[in-house]
Amino acid sequence: MTATQRDAGFGIVETDARPPVRIGVIGTGRIGRMHAQLLAREIDGATVPAVADAVPAVAERVAADLGAEAATIDEVLASPAVDAVAICTSTDTHVDLVVRAAQAGKAIFCEKPVSLDLAQVDRALAAVASAGVPFMVGFNRRFDPGHASVHSAVRSGQIGELHVLRITSRDPSPPPPAYVAVSGGIFLDMTIHDFDMARHVVGSEVVEVFARGAVRVDPLIGEAGDVDTAVVVLTHEDGTLTTIDNSRQAVYGFDQRIEAFGSLGMAVSDNPARHAGWVRTATATAAQPLPWFFLERYLESYRQEWAAFVTYLRDGGPSPVDPEAGRAPVLIGIAATRSLREGRPVAIAEVQ
Amino acid sequence: MTATQRDAGFGIVETDARPPVRIGVIGTGRIGRMHAQLLAREIDGATVPAVADAVPAVAERVAADLGAEAATIDEVLASPAVDAVAICTSTDTHVDLVVRAAQAGKAIFCEKPVSLDLAQVDRALAAVASAGVPFMVGFNRRFDPGHASVHSAVRSGQIGELHVLRITSRDPSPPPPAYVAVSGGIFLDMTIHDFDMARHVVGSEVVEVFARGAVRVDPLIGEAGDVDTAVVVLTHEDGTLTTIDNSRQAVYGFDQRIEAFGSLGMAVSDNPARHAGWVRTATATAAQPLPWFFLERYLESYRQEWAAFVTYLRDGGPSPVDPEAGRAPVLIGIAATRSLREGRPVAIAEVQ
Amino acid sequence: MTATQRDAGFGIVETDARPPVRIGVIGTGRIGRMHAQLLAREIDGATVPAVADAVPAVAERVAADLGAEAATIDEVLASPAVDAVAICTSTDTHVDLVVRAAQAGKAIFCEKPVSLDLAQVDRALAAVASAGVPFMVGFNRRFDPGHASVHSAVRSGQIGELHVLRITSRDPSPPPPAYVAVSGGIFLDMTIHDFDMARHVVGSEVVEVFARGAVRVDPLIGEAGDVDTAVVVLTHEDGTLTTIDNSRQAVYGFDQRIEAFGSLGMAVSDNPARHAGWVRTATATAAQPLPWFFLERYLESYRQEWAAFVTYLRDGGPSPVDPEAGRAPVLIGIAATRSLREGRPVAIAEVQ
Amino acid sequence: MTATQRDAGFGIVETDARPPVRIGVIGTGRIGRMHAQLLAREIDGATVPAVADAVPAVAERVAADLGAEAATIDEVLASPAVDAVAICTSTDTHVDLVVRAAQAGKAIFCEKPVSLDLAQVDRALAAVASAGVPFMVGFNRRFDPGHASVHSAVRSGQIGELHVLRITSRDPSPPPPAYVAVSGGIFLDMTIHDFDMARHVVGSEVVEVFARGAVRVDPLIGEAGDVDTAVVVLTHEDGTLTTIDNSRQAVYGFDQRIEAFGSLGMAVSDNPARHAGWVRTATATAAQPLPWFFLERYLESYRQEWAAFVTYLRDGGPSPVDPEAGRAPVLIGIAATRSLREGRPVAIAEVQ
């Protein structure tokens, strides 16, 4: 984010004379409310005319806070004052909403994952293709400034031909076992972000997956039929190898790193610090552990994600996170799940 | 900032059942507008019922944005719906506003500096003392998480008895020479933050100042009668020595560091990174230069500053930045200016 | 290394009154000469009475340099003035020398690998067991201070139960293709160090290996039947997962890192810097790339390795790198090679 | 140090066909013995034909260790097999030995300081000038790779015009008070290294000194008439400002940093780490404190110092640390001592 953009955030500078993109936010739980706030307050060129939620009182509260209108989903989809919708509801409702929004001719931002069911994903993407509306999946990590710098170093040729990509992705604390049971499993629930990042950074599709997992954090996760610790090897079409390691619990905070190694060097996105203070004594040089909360870590990525969406709608060009990103990571996750169960590498072609 | 606090920022969690502190913001230029936005949107326990500005249209715009009332200064000071005022106008108007706000019985947050004229500062502080209203000076850097960690390490005894404090404070780019001419000089305009920090971290008053300066960045600054590069040595009452170095232009960004060295170790507040990405090639390991804009660097300090103000008003106790902080740094600045001109160390007692 | 030990290196302090361990060095090529120099000059409690080499002139030159006797291998093995031998010859001669040294009753330090042929390894270990002589394999990386700190953090329980181990091991430049052809392949030639480290840090045997590889650095390596880029997943008996990534060419230097992740945190051995200087300009914050030469990177590990050998011989106890370390990494390498060829995970039990 | 040089250290590569420089080492206490060992074993192009010490047994021991001859000082100075002498005796004997060596036509390396008495320094330098022999002062820190990188960044113009130099120099533990009493005071004993570095990096002579000091580490140091904590501001002829802070005791190790700030950026020499291992837990990210012993920190600087001396003798050109470096830092130290006592800045011209 440049100083100018930031300044706009707190100033009264207009950087673009075009009318703003009017985005209706559907689903105003934690993530939807955050999106609505960012769009209403911090994103140049965006406004939030209306918000909707399955619980009207929740939508009303957010609407009042932002000076938006509280509406029903039907009203949002029908409103001529709405150019685009942000679909931030629970995953099981995404596909129907995508289909309806596409039919209503709205540009669509859909939180990830579109669906964990491949047939459903395909139904949504078909509707989007048929309507010809702009469509972007909410893989926000692509827009993290550190991760984006790795992507940019690879694309620009700065590190030469890419040989190996390494991703570490560890959550600060595990979800409740009840959630785990309906999550689709670690690969579709958590690693899916890393699968998206692997495709995005490497720029070549995954053709084979090998996964190993273990229950090391919480036996209840095992009882729910899942693992909490995993290692994955992806083979890409162009020969690049990606390794991923996941844990549901890094006690020191949210650990999210990417390293791209190539013929001319390597590009790394390390973890940001909580702050830049540290202490050195006779026994140690000690700094803080990592940011714990996802908004400490990834808030800037959401800002950049929305800026990219607005630019996409205004200027056209390819989607910043195109429909295939709603499909391919799900496929990889399904293959990883099978690999884990069957103890062998699984080709993506097997699960198509 | 804890995860819980952050979550509150985007969620609907109430962390305190007490009525909010209602803060009228006077002056809605760049810094005042930022304060108003933070108070209205991000600070638990604060609301902004009204804002005022010398230019009514500016106040109206901010008011509309925040759902506040645009008012005159008189109205803000007279309003029973205003518990406290944030004085964010130009420096030359601070003292009158502090006096009027004190007489109106409002709690007062006053942007730094209260005044560059010692007699005026004393007039403001006398009014505050006489009215017995809460009062806090806006030295935001005390609340930067890194800087605060140094203060905390010193106060807790973690680094033992403090021996030497080192402060580096370099701006990314110089102000216009026209501003320099009326700024009061580098020591009262820029180093005053460092003087405040030295008092805050050391916890012992400054008794002597030695300053050296040079014009290295821009000859026009010299023609305006000021220096743009300076080194200062402070001797504190308890024997601690503080060194400060300043520049009006660090081409690599906003360079703000503090290092406290003591008998058991050292505590450091280093610069935060723009982001945590870097690239290593055959010739170098290269990361970004520093954050450039003050909001990239210090936004969190403003949040924490307001959180401290709200806590102070609600829970009582000493002011987080007490009235003496409106006076002592000005004194040190005056002594530094004299030291620079006369080429000798100057005792604070000389300029009292 | 403590200050006291270092001081001894350049001083005249005696830290141990016991007679020194007299070590005959067999093989005085590059690595053998280094060992001889370290033993003769820098390691407390060791002397080098004699050195031998297949090329007598080479041994004579080293002997003259160190004030040792140039001898034949037979003489070294027969000499009553030799307590232990350091076998630093080419790999294909190790086993015969180990057997002869064992029969001669000498304590044995054998450079890694003992042999790439499992039957030969077993012959050597059997001779050692039968003679009951002390035996240590030269896996020096265990003694690198950074890597050793990871091992120590795991063993001490500081990071809790170990979940995932990650090893990155990249050479600065590839060996000649002619060497590659006779090297046994990347897993037995290069990754064998990482297999040793995985066993050492995890403390649990490897039960299964999955390997993927590619030719990305040099097509001639592919023509020689090998890969130059590899990713390996090890499953340990206790459930810990290890990932390894290798490259024959990191253009920025010798890249050697270990990360142990567990229930209470993580321990990391990062790369040391060439030096601690760096430059920050308007465009970047830039430091040196990594140390290039293995002695810049690992010299201290060799010192600590010899200190451990001397302590082992004087004080008894288990070998710092016991006979099994001569065998298990070879097994893992053989399994990795098969996994790469057959495209499936291979159990260690298959290749026993 | 390049890989090639290092390789030479343990290999049998000859990199220069010219006859070696034959250096007689006078004084084989701790520092002299280290120099003799480095010259005899690690420096290409140097040999040590003879060593001498006031205590013959000490010289004999070192001689035996290195295959050199133990000689008297007279013999070293008279020997036709000695091209240069390294004067490593106690400071009070330096001047006489420099004069005698100059008269004997030997090239001279003299440990710092030449003398703390300005008249004595001048006597030594006059003898050197009169004899026209090569002469180098042993300010080894100039050759530390990190510090040298700062010097190089300044000289090359990489950071533009230099504005401010900051030096931090803290010893791990204080000398005995008995030593302090005869040391000449902190500025001549310890800060003299920093005065040399300031001249070296800035490249402009110091014209004024302001010093402040305190007794914070050990009251016995105060009773011995010295301070143990000091802050110094140097004004250079070209307007550059240097700040130095010293302490006799940094409990976390040997803290030696330099920062050069200029119009195009800054160059920093930070402290090297003990090793590159660290641990992150729920409470902290913790690494080692600093190297403690001067050889851990500065051994490489001694190697580079000797390489520079050998090159100077073989290739000619200006001395790497010229005679003026034997004089100017003493002058600055005398001025600093007076500034501390009189509480005012002192011009170098006053103490000439």
Image (cartoon, coloured by chain):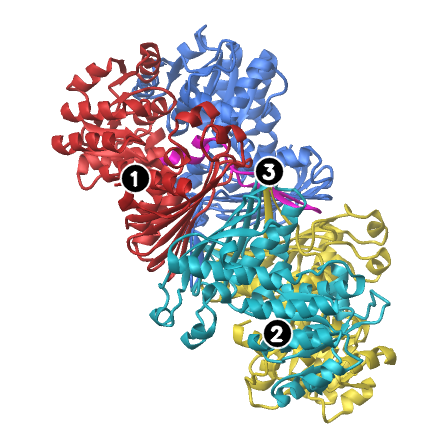
Chain colours: A yellow, B cyan, C blue, D red
Mark 2: secondary structure = helix
Q: Is residue D300 magenta?
A: yes
Q: Relative to the observer, which residue lies in front, D11 or D131?
A: D131
Q: CA distance from mark 1 to mark 3?
A: 33 Å
Q: Is residue C311 above or below residue D140?
A: above
For residue A80, side relative to residue C259 (left or right): right
Q: Are marks 1 and 2 on the same chain?
A: no
> Which chain does tag 1 point to?
D
> Which chain does tag 2 point to?
B
Q: Which residues are magenta?
A: D274-301
Mark 1 vs mark 3: in front:
1
For residue B14, side relative to residue D25 (left or right): right
Q: Is residue C177 visible from the viewing direction of this image?
A: no
What mark, if any, has residue B264 been given in the picture? 3
- Amino acid on which the number 2 mark rests in the picture: Val
Provide residue C61's location: percent of width, then percent of height: 30, 20
Q: CA distance from mark 1 to mark 2?
A: 51 Å
Mark 1: secondary structure = helix
The C terminus of chain B appears in which quarter of the rendering? bottom right
Mark 3: secondary structure = loop
Q: Which residue is mark 1?
A: D331
Provide residue D312's location: percent of width, then percent of height: 21, 37
Q: Is residue B131 visible from the viewing direction of this image?
A: yes
- Amino acid on which the number 3 mark rests in the picture: Leu
Provide residue D145's location: percent of width, then percent of height: 38, 42
Quarter of image, res A168: bottom right
The reply to whether the C-beta atoms of the residues labelled 3 and 2 are less than 8 Å apart is no
Q: How many marks?
A: 3
The N terminus of chain B appears in which quarter of the rendering? bottom right
What mark, if any, has residue B95 been given in the picture? 2
